[in-house]
Amino acid sequence: MKLLLVSLAVVAAVAHATVFLDEKIGEGWEENWVQSKATSDLGQFKASAGKYFNDAEADVGLQTSQDAKFYAMSTRFEEFNNEDKTTYIQFIVKHEQNIDCGGGYVKIFPASLDQEAMNGDSPYNVMFGPDICGPGTRKVHVIFEYNGENYLVNKNIPCKFDEGSHLYTLVISPDNTYEVRIDGEKVESGSIEEDFDMLPAKKINDPDVSKPEDWVDTKMIPDPEDVKPEGWDQPEHIVDPEAEQPEDWDEELDGEWEAPMIDNPEYKGEWVHPQIDNPDYSPDDKLYQYDSFGVLGLDLWQVKSGTIFDSFLITDDEAAVEAAVAEFKERVKGETAAKEAAEKAEAEAAAAAAAAEAEEQEDDDTEEVDDEEDEDVHEKDEL
């Protein structure tokens, strides 16, 4: 009976698992996406699999196509509340242009978003993905909204910055924890409360306590029992009796004498301010929870365009996530093989071109020598 109950529970959990968004870019993709009209000079996305791919159709994504532009485009999905759900946000991003500065992240908005008015100030629930700007900024953004404010994770999470495809996954759990995965592997995790500074500190310095006036925190003092040795005040240098003093010479001053140091008998250590419970702190077991998820948006800036976004997945179904990871790994194998083959072909073509050029140069040199010899013979005949 117990085994049967467990089985029924598993079946029920699977039955309630939902894929809210599974967006792959294919023919007619424009019907699912809304270009923001917040400004007239926003960059345009185009459909492309890039230079190297595993499948010319399946690997098509949304590619930024104009340099030094803001981009703002979004797609809507079935609205849901993630209360008591483990939520997965996942997508593929490929910076095949060797990005110098730009975003590779997504924003998840409430269903109330006006998509045509979406801009950088539009309120969102979650922002997640890589952000790169030179060698100094190469990190994964994880930002949660709470009570109208956006909170960035207080940990540094390095992102990938090569030219290949990478899969980014954010897991938001109902126990107020989060996890970041790259290419299906966990790279960071933790408590939302501890890692996002949403709530006031649990403890604060006791306002009724201050550092005692007689508190000694000087660890070392001059030894009171030590005295300056006799004859210490001897000059560091003397005039070489065999040398003549230059006219502009200044005599060296005596070196400064310093008493040796000993442990301070009055030392009490560094004073630590006593702490008390913060009266303003109140726990919140719903930091992870949002009443409405309904829109995924690409709202970002890029200096050098060419980034490709693909395979957007939002779900509470772990099996769907695992299937997408397996599919991604096969994709990367093919993409890597295609790139290596292309680079090999380019190298062989370059080597062949160089050899042909060298052979042509050698022929030219030979013809030049022959012409010179013919001229020499002609001159001798004339003589």
Image (tube, grey):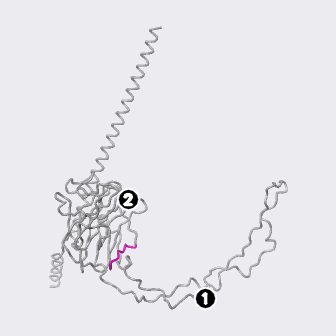
Which residue has dot 1 on it?
A: 213
Quarter of the figure with residue 370 = top left
Describe residue 129's horizontal placement relative to residue 378 as left or right. left
Residue 18, given in percent of the width and then of the height, sits at: 18, 73
Q: Earlier in the sequence, mark 2 or mark 1?
A: 2
Q: Residue 274, which numbered label?
A: none
Is residue 265 inside the magenta stretch? Answer: no
Residue at screen point 15% across, 77% down: 11
Mark 2 or 1: the one toward you: 2
> Is 379 or 281 nearer to us in this picture?
281
Which residue has dot 2 on it?
A: 101
Q: Amino acid at mark 2?
A: Cys
Residue 297, given in percent of the width and then of the height, sits at: 26, 66
> Is 223 or 97 nearer to us in this picture?
97
**Which secondary structure, mark 1?**
loop
**Which secondary structure, mark 2?**
strand
Numbered-mark total: 2
Residue 322, given in percent of the width and then of the height, sits at: 23, 67
Asked whether disc 2 touches disc 1, contact meaning CB atoms under 8 Å apart, the reply is: no
> Is 10 or 313 nearer to us in this picture?
313
Which span is picked out in magenta? 146-154
Quarter of the figure with residue 306 = bottom left
Screen quadrant of the N terminus:
bottom left
Q: Amino acid at mark 1?
A: Glu
> Is 56 or 295 nearer to us in this picture?
295
Badge 2, how many Cα within 10 Å: few under 14, some, many 20+?
Answer: some
Describe residue 284's horizontal placement relative to residue 61 as left or right. right
Badge 1, how many Cα within 10 Å: few under 14, some, many 20+?
Answer: few
Is residue 151 inside the magenta stretch? Answer: yes
